[in-house]
Amino acid sequence: MNYDEKNTINISETLIGKDYPCYVIGEIGINHNGDIDIAKKLIDLAITAGANAVKFQKRNLDSLYRLEVLENPNIESQGLEILLDVLKKVELSDSDYHEIIKYCNEKNITFLCTAWDAKSVDFLESIHIPAYKIASADLTNFPLIEYISRTKKPILISTGMSTMDEIEKTVNFLKERDVNFLLLHSNSTYPAPVDTLNLSLIPHLKSKFQLPIGYSGHEQGIIPSVTAAVLGAVLIERHITLDKTMDGIDQSSSLELLEFSQLIKFIREAENSIGKPIKKMTRGEILQKEVLGKSLVSQCDIETGEIFSENNLEVRGPAKGLSPQFFYEIQGKKSKRSIKKGSYLQSDDL
């Protein structure tokens, strides 16, 4: 596989890369709080906003943590104790996921999921997921990355809480396995302060690794995510919620319907405004130039053979004659014709 900046990711027949519209994922994650009705409402929210895909998270806690930790989380840290308490409450059943997949298919939106362990990968393979997300926490988890790589499906991998050396090792690991993947620049603080986002890493990562780069944002608000798209992020992932005040560890750094809709609207407007590196006048500009532009005009009658100079030339509007950019070039040359006072000079007069 040729890993250059033209590399693209194909998810459910949608191409993601620098020559295509920014792909937007509504990260539902665990914001459904274990309630499939809330999950469906969040899917509807993403569709209304105009997202390309929704994403969930699948875990098998028995595979992720030691038995003694699951039985007594406080032997580790208070943060882990809180996290495990939440995860035990919100994990959807396999039958729930089957229903969610069916709902996404009916609504014509792509279902994606973060796989946190091999058992979850096996389940997601059984429901024919089109691509995998690997969380920042698993960027260094080579056994899991290897297991997902064997599916030969595209991989989106977040780079939060990682050093550049760790990112480089994982990139090389994936390239050796001929996997189609992209990196997501990310700051894994929830919510992430705006002054810690370092969005300039997006073009840097693209240049360094010759890969498509996306952005997984955890900040409050939408301006940084729009900025990320302008800086070249080919994919934007943001957590979404029905209400930021709902219970849940990710709700406060999530976007409600209005914000998520505005985010996608602004990304599309930014894409339209960026356009292509071609300088040409629009029809509107041509009309404006005719009215507001300037021409070289004769200050007085100029006879055939008379020398053009500052004494017989001046600049006046509108732009119907020779451009004043030729004001100095034409001086010292003889007039090829008789020109009445106030007449526009033409290109032939050069």
Image: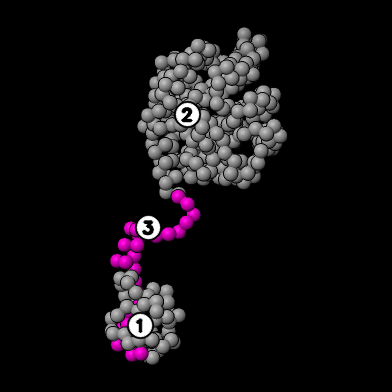
- Residue type at the position of mark 2: Ala
Q: How far apart are marks 1 and 3 (CA)?
A: 30 Å
Stretch in magenta: 275-304
On the rendered image, what quadrant is the N terminus found in? top right
| Tag 2 residue | 53
Mark 1 Cα shell of 10 Å, populated few (<14), some (14-19), many (≥20):
many
On the rendered image, what quadrant is the C terminus found in? bottom left
Along the polypeptide, which appears first: circle 1 or circle 3?
A: 3
| Tag 1 residue | 313
Residues 32 and 198: in front is 32
Q: How far apart are marks 3 and 2 (CA)?
A: 35 Å
Give the SS element for disc 3. Answer: loop
Give the SS element for disc 2. Answer: strand
| Tag 3 residue | 282
**Quarter location, residue 201:** top right
Residues 206 and 226: in front is 206
Mark 2 Cα shell of 10 Å, populated few (<14), some (14-19), many (≥20):
many
Residues 77 and 254: in front is 254
- Residue type at the position of mark 3: Thr
Q: How far apart are marks 2 and 1 (CA)?
A: 64 Å
- Residue type at the position of mark 1: Leu
Q: Relative to 184, is 325 above or below?
A: below
Give the SS element for disc 1. Answer: strand
User: Residue 145 placed where, x, y %?
Assistant: 66, 26
User: Residue 186 placed where, x, y %?
Assistant: 56, 35
Q: Which mark is residue 47?
A: none
